[in-house]
Image (cartoon, helix red, strand yellow):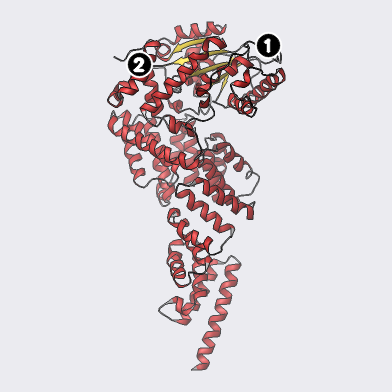
Amino acid sequence: MATGQSNEAQTAEAALQAAFEALGQGDATGAESRARRVLAIAGASDPLTASVDAVVVLALALAQQRRAAEALPLFEALVARQPQVPEHWSNLGNALCELGREADALPPLQQAFKRGDRSAALFYALARAELANGRPLPALTCIDRALALEALDPEFLLFRARVLFAMDETDQAAATLASLRSSALPFDLRVEAAEIQLNLANYADAQRAFEALLVEDPGHPGALIGLSTCHERHNRLDEAEAVRARVDEARARAVPDVGSALAQLDARLAARRGRPEVARALFEAVLVDPPRDPALRTNLRFELGKACVEMRDHAAAFSAFSLGHAERLAHVNAAHPNLMREDGLLAALDRAVPAFRTGVREGADDGHRDPLFVVGFPRSGTTLLEQLLDAHPALASFDEQPFLQRLVTRMNASPAGYPGGLVDLPAAHRRDFRAQYFADVQRQRPDLAARRPVDKNPLYLVRLPLVAALFPDAQAVLALRHPCDVVVSCWMQNFRAPAFAVTFETLKSTARMYDRVFRTYFDFRDAIGVPTHVLRYEDLVADVAGEGRRLFAFLGLDWRDELLGFTERAKSRGVISTPSYTQVVQPVNRRAVGRWQAWRPWFDGETLDLLAPWVERFGYSLD
């Protein structure tokens, strides 16, 4: 009897050793079978009584096979039996992360850290858990600690890009992704990288990545959904629907995140095809169990709200937009705890523009044509206007870029800052600033040649003093629209700029910002003397040819009747990054005129009091 027990013990010990070796060699299935053999030899009702080590190997082997649901109870039993072992807590947290329960993983991962685990895997899991709990700053700290230990781990780098996206640091996120392009990533990580490119609105890069993935796996649902989304963002709806038709729904819906992405795609395509009731139902279904990514979840609220608007259910739309704003604001406060009520652009609203020399030609002999700036409050028709201007062969516009803001940032590094530094701006600085600006333009439009650049960025309205200091031959077009329509439209958008989460949180806060922006503009308008053509959106959509002739006469350019087809031309331009990308490719119409009237019940007294003077000044009515 004793000999038999001894033989069994030896057999179990040998099997356990073999299990450890298999696990170390990456043979998870072999490790699993050997660990189960150890437990079978012991024959105890409680596996932990038989062999804690065998349970550890079994749980890890299951986790390596992506069978986290089976591994989870084993890890839970291990932390109960040996709470002093940090690896048990870490493994439990990782299993929860793999099951999509990152938020629940934070306490056990914190226990692992408390008990001495300082591994890269722990910091990665902590980063995932922190982000899932709406804490992007600690998530960035954790993923950076993981990368300090394993600097080239592609999974860590991808997650760092995801965290930076959540923090609205899109340039840094793109740079992190760029560092991976030369790496031979596994297929699933390349899918993730392409999805991050999509979230960052780098649609051309994302499209190329998805197309390459589909060469290897033509039926991969995530890649097909991503490619279809790229086509939709490029306003290629037929292509988007053709790619969508290739998705195997059973395969897609077998994975929760992919199934949700498919439903979101279907909702967007339905909205684009004029079926808001279908879009609304799909968005509502997705939001029953919304995506874990707070940025994506918030965007769904706004998309749902717009579908409700199309159905004329403004009460439901108001609820969706309000919830979206609340989520966005909470996320921005977590990601930007030190954010002032205005960002660098809007901070100028509190600084008086000093008297300075305008029309200075020092440095203007650099061979560049000074730009035309299209400005106004957001959602005033600037994108539509830009498309009309870009259709003229003498002009070339580009997607909204922070070129002027970069110059302001440089100026703010000096003691005088902006706009104080405009008073004594040295000629060398003026030449340097111009050189940087036109270098940025050239990178954006390498085909510029002799054409005049059109820089459309609405709130550069408050940067016109800098324009007056650097570009003596610059002109501006000020786009106006009924102030109440502008306020409603801004409030309905999920802008990427973090400060706009505060600025446009409510109709009232949006009206306050509208009032501040135009009071600031009219304070300095006459002093800076930038030639400006004022164009009302309502007039443009009512008479494109008439307003177009007046606009191009101001610019010293001829009018051509073929310019009337500018919305068709816009379809071939590629991505339009502004929220109006779906509207500007449609024939010019008046559907957006007077939309604020449907929202009048939500305009309180202060909101209308703020807007009424501007309604009168710009020639509109509150009737």
Please tell me whether mark 2 or mark 1 is closer to you in this view: 2
Amino acid type at circle 1 is: Arg
Q: Closest to the observer: 215 or 588?
A: 588
Task: Work out how far the residue at label 2 is from the one at label 1, CA to CA, in angstroms.
Answer: 40 Å
Mark sitting on residue 207: none
Answer few, some or many: residues within 10 Å of disc 2's Cα (few below 14, many 20 plus, some between 14 and 19): some
Q: From where the camera sits, is residue 595 visible?
A: no
Report helix, strand or loop for mark 2.
helix
Q: Closest to the observer: 317 or 548?
A: 317
Q: From where the camera sits, is residue 14 visible?
A: yes
Residue 14 placement: quadrant: bottom right
Q: Closest to the observer: 90 or 270?
A: 90
As displayed, is residue 377 above or below residue 234?
A: above
How far from the left and from the top, in percent, is residue 8? Answer: 52, 86
Q: Closest to the observer: 13 or 108?
A: 108
Report helix, strand or loop for mark 1.
loop
How far from the left and from the top, in percent, is residue 271? Answer: 37, 32
How far from the left and from the top, in percent, is residue 377? Answer: 46, 21
Amino acid type at circle 2 is: Ala
| Residue with the mark numbered 2 | 612
Q: Which of the image's four quarters has the C terminus?
A: top left
Q: Residue at x 42, y 45 (%)?
A: 291
Mark sitting on residue 361: 1
How far from the left and from the top, in percent, is residue 332? Answer: 46, 39
Residue 277 placement: quadrant: top left
Query: Is tag 2's residue or tag 1's residue first in the polypeptide sequence?
Result: 1
Residue 72 placement: quadrant: bottom left
